[in-house]
Amino acid sequence: MRAARSLVLVTLLPVFAGCQLLSSKPVDSTAGLTRLQGELVSDSGKLIFQPCVGQQRYVISDSATTTLVQDATDMPNTPGKLFADIRGRFVSAKSADAEGEVTVQQLYRLERNSTACKDPNFKLQTVHASGNGPAWEVQAGGKGLILEREGQPNLALPYVEEQAGDGRFSLSTEANNQRIELWVAPQRCTDSANGSVQHLVAELRVNGQVQRGCGYFGGARND
């Protein structure tokens, strides 16, 4: 009888283990990390990140998944400050006159832009995407999206978001007998017009016609 009970217990062990796995909470990949926007400057051979808000400066250190230092070196030397939107592990300096450190885990955007720190729309956006030939831009937020296209009137529309797995998703809407979709996926993307680096590839589809570009998450999305 004891042997039978032992066999039952052994048989049930995988079931209990499966229950524990199913009830475990998903790991938060952003735990302990902070997203900030700011300016990059070179100082004494080091790449320094100066956030848009505050006086503390941070020495940039790439993680195994980013190449921010190399990207900043390769960025076209055009007018404008070197703006960066990053997520990483920030360690403040122990004294006010010293520099802290940041290990970058995610690069959202790197571009020449002297006004990005003052962009009033950034905090309201969930997704921003744009492309060239002809130029187009999509700004999406909680109240809808705005589509701007070269030679076309601007459109302000509601939309539906659908997840497609592996971080991919689409925003879709219909207006004036037009089917409009924005598809984005997590993949490094370089803008052919200005050399900016963004973390999403994007496709704008209007009635089946496709235009490609790049995109990034706005301040209203914490992915």
Image (tube, rainbow, N blue to C red):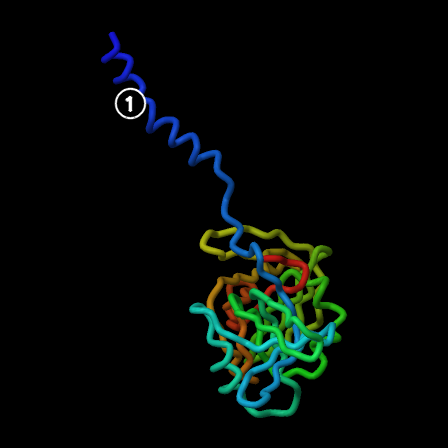
Q: Residue furthest top?
A: 1
Q: Is residue 12 left or right of residue 84?
A: left
Estimate the x, y position of residue 217 in percent, counting from the top left: 60, 64
Residue at figure coordinates x 54%, y 85% from the top left: 46
Residue at figure coordinates x 70%, y 67% from the top left: 122
Estimate the x, y position of residue 130 in percent, counting from the top left: 59, 73
**Residue 173, picture quadrant:** bottom right
The foreground one among 172 and 105 is: 105
Binning the other alpha carbons within 10 Å of mark 1 as few (below 14), some (14 to 19) or many (20 upward) gives few
Estimate the x, y position of residue 39 in percent, counting from the top left: 65, 80
- In the displayed structure, 167 sits above or below 40; it is above
- In the displayed structure, 125 sits above or below 116; it is above
Q: Is residue 68 visible?
A: yes
Estimate the x, y position of residue 26 in percent, counting from the top left: 50, 44
The foreground one among 78 and 153 is: 78
Q: Quadrant of the N terminus?
A: top left
Residue type highlighted by circle 1: Val
Residue at figure coordinates x 73%, y 72% from the top left: 53
Question: Number of marks in the image?
Answer: 1
Q: Quadrant of the C terminus?
A: bottom right
**Residue 207, picture quadrant:** bottom right
Q: Is residue 151 visible?
A: no
**Secondary structure under the numbered disc 1 in the rendered image:** helix
- In the displayed structure, 169 sits above or below 40; it is above
Mark 1 lies on residue: 10
- In the displayed structure, 221 sits above or below 109; it is above
Residue at figure coordinates x 66%, y 82% from the top left: 113
